[in-house]
Image (cartoon, rainbow, N blue to C red):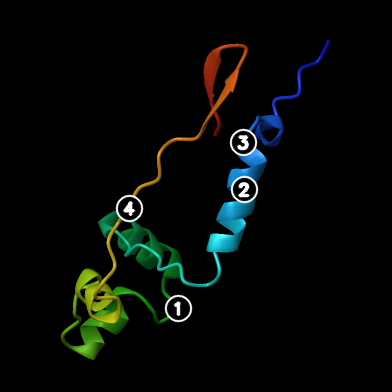
Amino acid sequence: EAFDWDFRNCPGQQKRLLAAEAASGGSHVKRPMNAFMVWAREELEGDDGGGKAAVLRGGSNPRLSKIHMEQHPDYRYRPRPKRTCIMDGRKLRIS
């Protein structure tokens, strides 16, 4: 007998899903890029005129985190708790 591991069948998950969809009404502010993400983006841009050469030509380049803080002064990172589903008396992590 195959077991359906779909987390939407867990009690209470449908209510949380509907609340999450309603809360995501365009007011979400993305986290600023960390150093690795900035480096990876520059590597992907390659020699098409973007990346490090554009930064050097442009003169001073303010750091992305400062720009993010200026654009969104009341932003605060709030990590969400890991989602779990209780089935057969066990907590199962939902990924």
| Between discs 1 and 2, the one toward the N terminus | 2
Q: Nearer the viewer, mark 1 or mark 2?
A: 2
Which residue is painted at 45% across and 78% down in the image?
48
Which residue is painted at 32% across and 52% down in the image?
78
Q: Position of residue 61 (x, y in %)?
A: 20, 81
- Distance in Å between CA atoms under marks 3 and 1: 50 Å
- Distance in Å between CA atoms under marks 4 and 1: 36 Å
Q: Nearer the viewer, mark 3 or mark 1?
A: 3
Q: Which residue is mark 2?
A: 17
Q: Quadrant of the N terminus?
A: top right
**Disc 4, SS:** loop
Q: Is residue 48 above or below residue 23?
A: below
Q: Is residue 91 above or below residue 72?
A: above
**Disc 1, SS:** loop
Residue at the bottom extreme of this rendering? 58
Q: Nearer the viewer, mark 4 or mark 1?
A: 4
Q: Which residue is mark 1?
A: 48
Between 45 and 83, the one nearer to me in the picture: 83
Q: Which residue is mark 3?
A: 12
**Disc 3, SS:** loop
Query: Tags 4 and 1 in contact by the CB under 8 Å rule?
Result: no
- Distance in Å between CA atoms under marks 2 and 3: 9 Å
Could you tell me the amino acid type at mark 1? Answer: Asp
| Between discs 2 and 3, the one toward the N terminus | 3
